[in-house]
């Protein structure tokens, strides 16, 4: 006896159609429903519903989140592989599905899928190829066949004006990282059974840590093909399959391969010795480092104009952090001009691995010029620190709930003999005030971090001058109750 049962990975009722409804929004004979069912059954079979994240696309399957009782993210058009990548990086244990149509994956999202595949992300991609833009009423897709009539190719697709259909499995298997690439078809019952096996395998691969799996499913869109559901299946076999051969393109990879590769360079693990050797000069230097513990997360914004060494001050800070065995990110932001435009660098330092490199609410602002303090003063957290270059900034911070140090960095640097190193004066002042990075570390990293070795001594003098200035001008505690952050 054949027993039909709705997979547990589906909700009991599909609320979009009103409580109690059992039907989806798909047209009669559409392949999306079939593919959904295969995926839901595989999720049930592997018992991973609670840890599955379904990244649904723009396209007819945009409402997949009404059907799958899993984690769901509705992604911007074509961007599901990028979202899936983000999920992969933060949820080790999640089973992540990128579900995409041909307009979504092979049109607007070409870049995302190629790069996710090329990185070999341990995700599963289900690519539903119906050779047309279904949701928007049947325009030409990248996979539309030569001669196929669509809304935008009323006389049939022409290679001369529209290019040739893109074989995504062929493209995927030109890359070395994907471990499983297969094209299947929903043309008839036997084909559906084969497709089901491919769907299952692609999910299992991910669960076993094998790597990037890609299954293309040739799928009918009767309404836009202007055929009955039965004729659509026939048309699929007779026309789509010859253009897109149904076969396994690649099936390699070993269970656990992803975990092994990850362990070799675990981003959340300790900073590798070779990184520290690069910054400190030798292995024996590393032994002399007091590893920092208990440091609150430092979110530093260094801002000024291009040419002031804003970005390099950020790199120096990040390098000091790495030398102390800490995690660090550095994110530059600058205009198109090499010199004179505004520039800032966001640096995060933490004992833990860092999720996002963005700094919206800095714990410290290092401002090299007036526009920088105007732009970022309001974003500093209450109790935070502003280190400002008083040579170029003619006002003190307006905030009374932050600590600040007005240091004539440009003048100090000029007096020592190299005005271009005002950035190092400011960074050293920050270090002297916060006790991080250790001044000793800053002094030890400078010779290795600076490309121009003839400037090392001058830069070390900048550090000494800043330390002396801070000792003579201690930073006062904030005087007022915290202001709301702007
Ligand atoms: C940024 C953006 N561009 C265009 C659209 C319009 N749009 C919606 S769905 C779609 C194509 C979907 O086709 P496909 O990915 O093949 O999925 P199907 O609907 O056939 O399942 C387009 C172009 C949109 N919603 N957003
Ligand atoms: S338009 Fe095509 S792809 Fe969209 S639901 Fe209808 S049959 Fe399916």
Image (spheres, grey):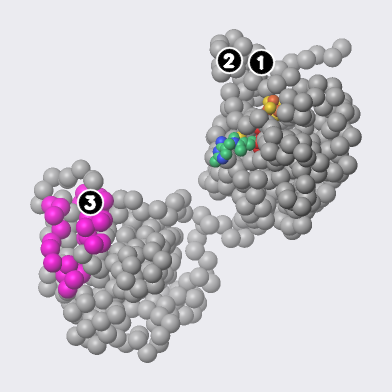
**Label 2 element class:** helix
- The residue lying toward the viewer, choosing from 401 and 80, is 80
**Label 1 element class:** loop
**What whole-number distance in Å separates the C-alpha atoms at marks 3 and 1?**
52 Å
* Ligand 2 under 8 Å from disc 1 Cβ: no
Residue at x 16% of width, y 70% of height: 390
78 left or right of 287 in image: right
467 left or right of 247 in image: left
Residue at x 62% of width, y 15% of height: 12
Query: Which residue is most to the left?
Result: 479
Q: Quadrant of residue 240?
A: top right
Answer above or below: position of 282 versus 318: below
As drawn, the label of residue 17 is: 2
Q: Report ligand 1 position as a quadrant.
A: top right
Pointer 2 and pointer 3: residues touching (CB < 8 Å)?
Answer: no
**What whole-number distance in Å separates the C-alpha atoms at marks 1 and 2?**
8 Å
**Residues packed near mark 2 inside 10 Å, few (<14), some (14 to 19) or many (20 plus):** few
* Ligand 2 under 8 Å from disc 2 Cβ: no
Pointer 3 and pointer 1: residues touching (CB < 8 Å)?
Answer: no
**Residue wearing tag 3:** 378
As drawn, the label of residue 423 is: none
First in residue order: circle 3 vs circle 1 = 1
As drawn, the label of residue 23 is: 1
**What whole-number distance in Å separates the C-alpha atoms at marks 2 and 3?**
47 Å
First in residue order: circle 2 vs circle 3 = 2
Whole-percent x, y for residue 245 in the image: 86, 44
Which range is magenta? 371-400
């Amino acid at each position: 006896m054949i027993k039909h049962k709705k997979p547990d990975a589906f909700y009991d009722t599909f609320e979009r159609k009103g409580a109690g409804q059992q039907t989806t929004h798909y047209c009669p004979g559409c392949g999306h429903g079939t593919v959904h069912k295969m995926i839901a059954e595989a999720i049930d079979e592997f018992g991973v519903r609670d840890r599955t994240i379904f990244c649904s696309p723009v396209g007819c399957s945009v409402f997949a989140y009404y059907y799958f009782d899993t984690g769901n993210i509705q992604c911007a058009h074509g961007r599901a592989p990028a979202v899936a990548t983000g999920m992969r990086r933060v949820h080790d244990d999640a089973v992540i599905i990128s579900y995409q149509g041909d307009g979504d994956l092979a049109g607007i999202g070409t870049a995302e899928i190629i790069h996710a595949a090329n990185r070999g992300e341990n995700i599963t991609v289900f690519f539903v190829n119906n050779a047309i833009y279904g949701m928007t009423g049947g325009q030409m897709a990248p996979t539309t066949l030569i001669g196929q009539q669509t809304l935008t190719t009323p006389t049939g697709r022409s290679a001369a004006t529209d290019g040739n259909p893109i074989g995504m499995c062929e493209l995927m298997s030109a890359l070395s990282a994907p471990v499983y690439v297969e094209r299947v078809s929903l043309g008839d019952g036997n084909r559906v059974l084969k497709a089901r096996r491919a769907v299952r395998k692609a999910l299992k691969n991910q669960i076993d840590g094998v790597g990037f799996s890609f299954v293309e499913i040739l799928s009918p869109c009767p309404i836009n093909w202007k055929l009955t559901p039965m004729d659509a299946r026939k048309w699929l076999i007779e026309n789509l399959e010859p253009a897109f051969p149904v076969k396994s393109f690649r099936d390699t990879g070993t269970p656990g391969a992803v975990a092994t590769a990850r362990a070799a360079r675990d981003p959340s693990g300790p900073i590798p010795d070779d990184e520290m050797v690069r910054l400190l000069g030798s292995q024996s230097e590393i032994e002399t480092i007091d590893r920092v513990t208990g440091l609150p997360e430092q979110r530093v914004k260094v801002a000024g104009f291009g040419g002031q060494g804003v970005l390099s001050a950020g790199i120096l800070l990040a390098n000091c952090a790495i030398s102390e065995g800490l995690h660090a990110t550095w994110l530059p932001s600058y205009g198109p001009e090499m010199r004179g435009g505004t520039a800032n660098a966001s640096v995060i330092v933490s004992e833990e691995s860092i999720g996002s490199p963005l700094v919206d609410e800095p714990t410290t602002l290092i401002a090299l010029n007036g526009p920088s303090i105007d732009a970022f003063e309001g974003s500093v957290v209450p109790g935070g620190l502003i280190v400002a270059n008083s040579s170029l900034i003619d006002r003190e911070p307006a905030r009374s709930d932050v600590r600040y140090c007005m240091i004539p960095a440009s003048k100090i640097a000029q007096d020592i003999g190299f005005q271009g190193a005002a950035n190092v004066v400011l960074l050293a002042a920050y270090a002297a005030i916060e006790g991080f990075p250790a001044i000793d570390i800053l002094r030890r990293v400078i010779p290795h971090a600076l490309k121009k070795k003839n400037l090392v001594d001058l830069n070390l003098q900048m550090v000494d001058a800043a330390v002396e200035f801070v000792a003579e001008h201690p930073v006062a505690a904030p005087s007022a109750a915290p202001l709301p952050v702007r």
